[in-house]
Image (cartoon, rainbow, N blue to C red):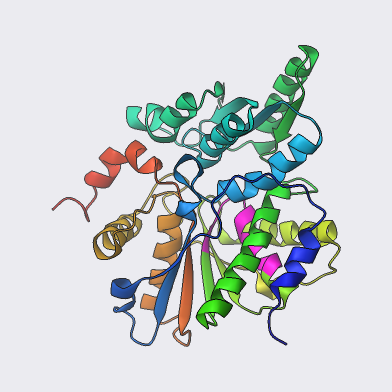
Amino acid sequence: MSADPERIDAALASWPRASLAHLPTPLDRLERLSARYPGITLWMKRDDCTGLAMGGNKARQLEFYLGDARAQGCDTVLSTGAVQSNYMRTIAASAAKLGMECHIQLEDRVQNASPDYRESGNVFLDRLFGAHIHHYPVGEDEQGADRAINALAEDLRAAGRRPYVVPLAPVEKPKGALGYVAAAAELLRQWQAMELSPDLVVVGSGSGLTHAGLLTGFRIAGSPVIVLGACVRRDAGQQATRILEHCRKLERMLGVGVCVAGEDVRVSDRALAPGYGKASDAVMATIADVARLEGILLDPVYSAKAVSTALQCLDLGEYADCDDIVLVHTGGTPALFAYREEILSSAPFNL
């Protein structure tokens, strides 16, 4: 049975959605990078081209969170993320677009960060979009960060606002993942129009909403395509558990029954070291290669780790039987400016 994206459309039909992203995003063939791997064609799903606030995957996720917020009559949105969070930048822009007040809480996940990291890139854009910025001193305490932002929401509610909190920690209804359930339908339609049958999709896996949403969407539609998540924040064992939990919640939310098998959840932490918000020489080399071969900018936190993971797998002979591989560019371009010193001083750029 061929994959049917209309099954995804039907499953999502009852969920409120705000229009934030420019969709569909392009699916580009990477001609020069593919030449390194005879018999394999690499494609890039350009979610850096979603339009809002310099693009990125978070616009898709926020369409469902803020659709829910508007359906509830909320006038203020709050959330938590890292200092250079693409999510916080996009939520600030989304709030501005929808006429909502925005409060973002930035956590310290990256130690000994440079002044550029703390003030440039996404932080600069957060301020331009008019977000109220708060700080949380711990970088690996999702529950504590959510408690702090919910306390702020209560203060705003007492002051007469109608707040809506976009959670950081896993919750029973991960509405943001619905954006990538929908993206699976978009990709299937692009593949059908281009007469493609990709064997593998590779995506950065952090919160897990993008990864789990894609995987669940493909399985709802009946597509067996492999989805490989490149770990950016936690190791493969922890991340696999997180992804499967998200998938189970999505199945319940959408009323589709169990469609994702445990063996469907594939993760790799090859490009994770030296940790969240930091990049190895291999990841820096990937940024250089994709910029100089394809004219595409990857950020060192998410997309470069996804592409580096895919290339390392291919260099080791893994997935050699694949004909077409799709690399998901989840955006993050503003973070390049926050990592300027680290990138330019790294071996691939120190020419």
Q: Position of residue 165 (x, y in %)?
A: 72, 32
Q: Position of residue 198 (x, y in %)?
A: 53, 79
Q: Quadrant of residue 131?
A: top right
Q: Position of residue 163 (x, y in %)?
A: 74, 26
Q: Residue at 55% of width from left, 72% of height from top?
A: 190
Q: Residue furthest top?
A: 159
Q: Position of residue 157 (x, y in %)?
A: 78, 18
Find out whether residue 141 is within the magenta segment: no
Q: Is residue 317 left or right of residue 256?
A: left
Find out whether residue 205 is within the magenta segment: yes
Q: Residue at 29% of width from left, 78% of height from top?
A: 36
In this rendered view, identify the residue nearer to me: 234 or 160: 160
Total residue callouts: 0
Q: Is residue 65 left or right of residue 307?
A: right
Would you say residue 316 is visible in this rendering? Answer: no
Which segment is the magenta one? 203-217
